[in-house]
């Protein structure tokens, strides 16, 4: 029993001696490493240098990734702003193009109105009306004809209305024919019915000698026909009138048939031959 105890102690002793040697060896190694570390010498520890280098590379990689991420964010933001700039530039270009087109249209419209205004004033002047350009014109806002600061809708005198209307339409026809580049699309044909209705009757070649007519403005009546002859040089004008002036006899082509009168007729069927109507 004592022998076993001694053997056990010896065994423990040997183990403690081995452990002491290991610890002493480790202590010496660490002391040498500490001394070399203090002297800035490399310490030959297994994988420590490699691990440190890897850690440095990892840290640098993290910094690079972080910086790259920021660069990507900036690039995406710049790209977003550039696309927005291009979109806005395209919109601006379209607006500028529309603006230029609109300005051309406005200039074109003003040019046409100026020419029509000139013709309108010329025709009214030919009828003997006193003209003040700031009071007699065609409005740029509503394209309504004005005479003496009153629109065609405001005049009470039937004679003035007739003259304004004929001068207005005549101005359009004359402008269309004089300036083909404007591309005005009036059919260039005009039919007028009884233009002397508001001017008083006129002594005509188709009135009996014993008939009496009150002529309100004989000179204006003649001037209207002279005006229409000027307009008709490049336009087709058809006038229906109960008492056409004798001076215009050569222009009379048709007379509507009237069974109740004995007046001479040039055309049995008149302007419209109903026998030709297939409807």
Image: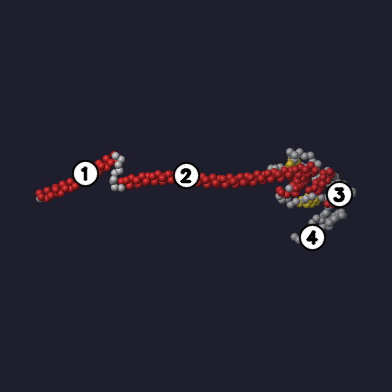
| Residue at the spot 79% in from the left edge and 58% down from the top edge | 274
Q: Real-space Cα distance between discs 4 and 2?
A: 87 Å
Point out residue 139 in the picture as x, y percentages from the top left corner: 71, 42
Secondary structure found at label 1 = helix
Q: Position of residue 249 (x, y in %)?
A: 85, 51
Disc 1 vs disc 4: which is toward the camera?
1
Task: State how far apart marks 1 and 4 are (Cα).
Answer: 143 Å
**Residue at mark 2:** 74
Q: How is the image coloured?
A: secondary structure
Q: CA distance from mark 4 to mark 3?
A: 30 Å
Q: Earlier in the sequence, mark 1 or mark 4?
A: 1
Neighbour class for label 4 at 10 Å: few (<14), some, many (≥20)? few
Residue under label 4: 275
* Disc 2 to disc 3: CB gap under 8 Å: no
Q: Earlier in the sequence, mark 4 or mark 3?
A: 3
Mark 2 vs 1, N-terminal side: 1
Residue lying furthest left: 2
Q: CA distance from mark 3 to mark 1?
A: 151 Å
Q: CA distance from mark 2 to mark 1?
A: 59 Å
- Asked whether the beta carbons under mark 4 and mark 3 sit within 8 Å of each other, the answer is no
Closer to us: mark 4 or mark 3? 3
Residue 246 is marked as: 3
Q: CA distance from mark 2 to mark 3?
A: 92 Å
Locate residue 11, reporting x and y percent: 15, 49
Q: Which circle's residue, 2 or 3, is located before the other in the chain?
A: 2
State the residue at coordinates (13%, 49%).
7
**Residue at image location 71% in from the left, 50% down from the top:** 183
Q: Which residue is mark 1?
A: 24
Outermost residue on the bottom side: it is 278
């Amino acid at each position: 029993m004592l022998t076993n105890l001694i053997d056990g102690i010896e065994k423990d002793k040997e183990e403690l001696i081995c452990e002491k040697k290991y610890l002493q060896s480790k202590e010496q190694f660490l002391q040498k490493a500490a001394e070399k570390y203090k002297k800035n010498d490399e310490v030959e520890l297994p994988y420590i240098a490699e691990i440190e280098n890897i850690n440095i590379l990892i840290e640098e990689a993290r910094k690079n990734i972080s910086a790259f991420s920021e660069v990507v964010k900036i690039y995406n933001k710049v790209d977003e702003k550039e696309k927005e700039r291009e979109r806005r530039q395209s919109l601006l270009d379209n607006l500028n193009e529309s603006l230029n087109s609109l300005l051309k249209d406005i200039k074109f419209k003003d040019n046409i109105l100026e020419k029509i205004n000139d013709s309108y004033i010329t025709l009214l002047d030919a009828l003997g009306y006193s003209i003040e350009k700031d009071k007699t014109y065609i409005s740029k806002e509503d394209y309504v004809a004005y005479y003496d600061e009153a629109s065609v809708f405001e005049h009470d005198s039937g004679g003035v209305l007739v003259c304004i209307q004929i001068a207005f339409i005549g101005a359009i026809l004359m402008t269309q024919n004089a300036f083909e580049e404007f591309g005005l699309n009036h059919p260039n044909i005009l039919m007028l019915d009884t233009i002397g209705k508001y001017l008083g009757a006129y002594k005509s070649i188709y009135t009996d000698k014993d008939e009496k007519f009150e002529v309100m403005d004989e000179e204006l009546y003649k001037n209207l026909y002279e005006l229409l002859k000027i307009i008709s040089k490049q336009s087709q004008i058809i006038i229906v009138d109960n008492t056409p002036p004798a001076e215009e006899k050569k222009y009379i082509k048709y007379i509507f048939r009237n069974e109740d009168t004995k007046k001479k007729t040039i055309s049995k069927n008149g302007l419209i031959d109903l026998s030709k109507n297939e409807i």
